[in-house]
């Protein structure tokens, strides 16, 4: 019996979880397999991950689909791979890890970022990449290593990102994609490396570490025999190198469906806010922050601003409540507290307090970069209760999203929303009011895996163009548009002005809370 190659697999290797998701050729999700991943935090700001363990976990996730889908191995027509962005994954000439990967969470490059950002050459670097320099990026991390740990780079033959490392293990090919290549070391207009950008980072003598750039919508490489044995897939299966996970998630969730003006926000532990524009219409802000990331669509890029912490702020508030209640009796579950959010929102006054959602110990990176930034709650009086604090935190997420989109130009005409928080009616209403735009939720469960699977589908000829694929995989899964409440729009216009004024005023004192005690 002949088995049809009717399955396309998307791999989405996040910082904590690696997922392998199977779709049919029409974009219907068939099943998923996931494996928890691990990383290590150090007191010096280090955040590292084992390259070998990450590959083993990826292979295990793929094998996990074998028992869930009948004739899975024989039915796989292609595999796309994406992963956590930024970071530095170094391998030697034999393809062995040089050291554990420096993740996007790693803060050790902060002094080097400050030094490079202050140089006259950074303006030209930003103009080419469209991306603000920060500690997350491979360019900053390589520059820091070159200054302080040159012995590491001396052992390396190739600098990869996480998805590139997985692609290397799947195919034996050292490569990166146009998105991470251009926002780190290149020019988003040409989708290629830029000598002037590499020079601005002080890395001209390390240029040999950068691999070739390939576009996974047009190029695939076959799965090697060794990788086939590890994953359970058939040797020779076409593998597509996806773009960075942020843009893959946005593609799967609807950032680009042909109209002008929509945007996409992923509100999870962190917040990612993206809009699709023609490369000629990019708005570069004066503060030199954010990203410009190429889409796997000719001449289209995404402008991006990212909050270091989004729902982490709400998790903090609920944890405070959980701890207090536990002091008096049984500890409530996180789910029980989440179920009370809508009730707390109804009991509280709109826009009564200002909350700055900079709860991360790494500070903030969008739409401004300040490792010292800290959360604050402003306007309290004796009449306020916990419900008011919860509302303030959720409204703070709306204000942060507006702050990010303001740095990219005009407000979006429609917001497509993904991430766990998209299920919250309260948050959707706040975002609609804060941005004065309609909100639609993507019903795509695994948008990141879908995005890279879409690239693989185009690469093997299942669709002639990415637009054709988007029309079938993405657009039909967008929910009904939820319109903004005029009362919230008016209140949040006023609240946003206060939010911006107070965050600028507080910036000079944030450093006092990050200095070690004397």
Image (tube, rainbow, N blue to C red):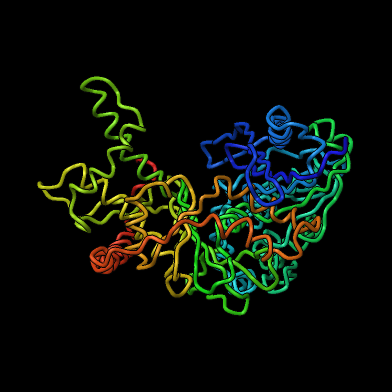
Image spot of residue 71 (x, y percent): 78, 32
Which residue, as the protein is rendered here, is positioned at the far left? Answer: 382
Front residue (pair 8, 20): 8
Q: Compared with residue 323, is residue 451 higher up or lower down, i.e. above or below?
A: below
Image spot of residue 225 (x, y percent): 89, 36
**Which residue is painted at 24% across and 27% down in the image?**
325
Report the quarter where the N terminus lies.
Answer: top right
User: How many numbered tags mark residues here?
Assistant: 0
* Res 202 visible: no
- Answer left or right for 467 relative to 229: left
Which residue, as the protein is rendered here, is positioned at the far top? Answer: 329
* Res 109 visible: yes
**Which residue is painted at 23% across and 43% down in the image?**
343
- Answer left or right for 409 relative to 460: left
Image spot of residue 506 (x, y percent): 30, 59
Displayed quadrant of residue 122? bottom right
- Answer left or right for 410 relative to 201: left
**Which residue is painted at 55% across and 72% down in the image?**
259
Front residue (pair 314, 45): 314
Report the quarter where the C terminus lies.
Answer: top left
Displayed quadrant of residue 295? bottom right
Front residue (pair 445, 211): 445
Q: Compared with residue 292, is residue 30 higher up or lower down, i.e. above or below?
A: above
Which residue, as the protein is rendered here, is positioned at the far front? Answer: 1
Q: Compared with residue 470, is residue 52 higher up or lower down, i.e. above or below?
A: above
Image spot of residue 232 (x, y percent): 80, 31
């Amino acid at each position: 019996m002949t088995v049809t190659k009717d399955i396309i697999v998307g791999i989405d290797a996040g910082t904590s979880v690696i997922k392998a998701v199977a779709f049919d050729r029409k974009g219907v999700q068939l099943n998923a397999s996931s494996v928890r991943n691990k990383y290590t935090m150090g007191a010096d700001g280090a955040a590292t991950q084992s390259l070998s363990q990450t590959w083993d976990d990826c292979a295990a996730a793929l094998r996990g689909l074998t028992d869930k889908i009948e004739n899975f191995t024989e039915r796989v027509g292609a595999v796309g791979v994406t992963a956590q962005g930024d970071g530095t994954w170094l391998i030697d000439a034999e393809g062995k890890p040089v050291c554990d990967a420096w993740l996007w969470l790693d803060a050790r490059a902060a002094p080097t970022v400050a030094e490079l950002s202050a140089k006259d050459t950074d303006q030209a670097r930003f103009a080419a990449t469209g991306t603000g320099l920060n500690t997350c990026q491979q360019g900053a991390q390589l520059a820091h290593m070159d200054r302080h740990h040159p012995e590491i780079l001396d052992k390396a033959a190739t600098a990869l990102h996480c998805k590139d490392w997985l692609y290397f293990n799947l195919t034996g090919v050292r490569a990166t994609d146009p998105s991470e290549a251009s926002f780190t070391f290149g020019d988003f207009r040409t989708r290629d490396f830029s000598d002037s950008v590499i020079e601005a980072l002080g890395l001209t003598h390390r240029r040999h570490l950068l691999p070739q750039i390939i576009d996974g919508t047009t190029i695939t490489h076959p799965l090697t025999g060794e990788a086939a044995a590890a994953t359970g897939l058939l040797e020779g299966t076409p593998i597509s190198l996806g773009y960075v996970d942020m843009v893959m998630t946005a593609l799967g969730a609807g950032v680009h469906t042909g109209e002008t003006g929509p945007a996409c926000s992923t509100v999870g532990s962190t917040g990612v806010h993206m809009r699709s524009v023609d490369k000629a219409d990019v708005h570069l802000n004066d503060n030199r922050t954010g990203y410009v990331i190429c889409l796997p669509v000719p001449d289209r890029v995404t402008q991006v601003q990212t909050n270091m912490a989004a729902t982490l702020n709400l998790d903090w508030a609920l944890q405070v409540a959980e701890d207090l209640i536990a002091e008096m009796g049984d500890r409530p579950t996180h789910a029980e507290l989440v179920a009370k959010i809508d009730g707390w929102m109804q009991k509280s006054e709109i826009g009564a307090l200002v909350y700055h959602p900079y709860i991360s110990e790494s500070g903030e990176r969008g739409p401004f970069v300040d490792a010292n930034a800290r959360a604050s709650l402003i306007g309290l009086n004796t009449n306020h209760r916990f419900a008011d604090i919860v509302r303030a935190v959720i409204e703070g997420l709306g204000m942060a999203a507006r702050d990010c989109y303001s740095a990219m130009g005009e407000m979006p005409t429609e917001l497509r929303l993904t991430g766990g928080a998209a299920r919250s009616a309260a948050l959707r209403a706040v975002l609609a009011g804060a941005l004065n735009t309609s909100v639609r939720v993507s019903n795509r469960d695994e948008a990141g895996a879908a995005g890279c699977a879409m690239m693989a589908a185009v690469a093997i000829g299942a669709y002639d163009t990415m637009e054709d694929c988007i029309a079938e995989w993405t657009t039909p899964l967008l929910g009904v548009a939820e319109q903004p409440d005029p009362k919230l729009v008016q209140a949040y216009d006023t609240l946003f002005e206060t939010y911006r004024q107070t965050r600028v005023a507080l910036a000079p004192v944030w450093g006092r809370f990050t200095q070690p005690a004397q």
